[in-house]
Image (tube, helix red, strand yellow):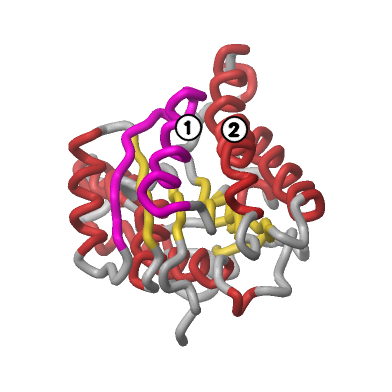
Amino acid sequence: MDLQLDGNAAIVTASSSGLGKASARALAAEGVNVVMNGRDEDRLAAAVEDVREDATGEVVGQVGDLTDPDDITAIVEETVAEFGGIDHLVTSAGGPPSGPFMETEDEDWYEAFDLLVMSVVRLVRESADHLQADGGGTIVNITSRSVKEAIDGLVLSNSVRMSVIGLEKTLSKELAPDVRANAVLPGTHETPRIEELVEQAVERGEYDSYEEGMEARSSGIPVGEVGQPMGLGRTVAFLSSPHSGYINGQAVVLDGGAGASNL
């Protein structure tokens, strides 16, 4: 299916790895001109070169820390300078530290809020005029299925990410009809982080092989396997496209049916 995105411009944050990178790859493969972002210059440069292999749009990198307002401004300005505007904003960020509530300090809460929520607030604030221009655009927030069902040991993610969903729903009304805002809520996907955790478990002797570890991670997922990042990336591209034009203000769960929530 032609998603009719050729020549559009997009920002994808935290895209030097994992789900952000997959989203950048999926958009670039559809002809979107993409600005990728990450904090590590070398890692970002390698990711940009990798994504360019499948791209039919242009791909550039912009180093920046999502907790730094000046860096966010620079990401937006670089996109406008390179491509003349912004049609799509895809927000992603690394997860906050795990741990139980009683071991979580005030500083942890503030840092998680700055990373997960204020980064989106600042990105949208800086991008809004561009997104609303020339027929409008889209926002897709990559969060976590933890906003639907709390995950043991992830009190920061369970609590703070819900603010992004409240923001996304508000934006879907306040920026409409020019801009549509949606979110994707991934469950377990075979990202570098999951690969690292499984490999560590193999080294500890918990599994005989990586394949056995991944099979264990798949236990309880009705489709029988963990998600692949490009599956999520293609969903992000679809939500950014005219083909999803009546989808607005939604939070789409991508967890293979593992969740128990009815809604």
User: Residue, x 61% and y 30% (percent of image)?
Assistant: 118
Tag 2 or tag 1, which sits nearer the N-term? 1
Residue 102 % position (x, y):
63, 18
Q: Residue at x 46, y 55 (%)?
A: 10
Hey, which quadrant is residue 261 in on the image?
A: bottom right
In the image, is residue 4 above or below residue 95?
Answer: below
What residue sits right under mark 2 in the picture? 122
Q: Nearer the viewer, residue 165 or 152?
A: 165
Three-letter amino acid code of the residue under disc 1: Ile
* Mark 2 element type: helix
Q: Is residue 228 visible?
A: no
**Residue type marked 2:** Arg
Q: Is residue 146 located in the magenta-colored stretch of the structure?
A: no
65 over 7 or under it: above or below: above
Marks 1 & 2, CB-CB < 8 Å contact:
yes
Location of the C terminus (image quadrant): bottom right
Q: State how far apart marks 1 and 2 are (Cα).
A: 7 Å
Q: Is residue 174 above or below residue 158?
A: below
68 in magenta: yes
Q: Residue 11 location, x and y as percent?
A: 45, 50
Query: Would you name the residue on which mark 1 appears?
Result: 72
**Residue placed furthest toward the bottom:** 1
- Mark 1, Cα crowd under 10 Å, few <14 / some 14-19 / many 20+, is many
Q: Which residues are magenta?
A: 58-84
Image coordinates of residue 143 in percent, x first then y, are: 57, 48
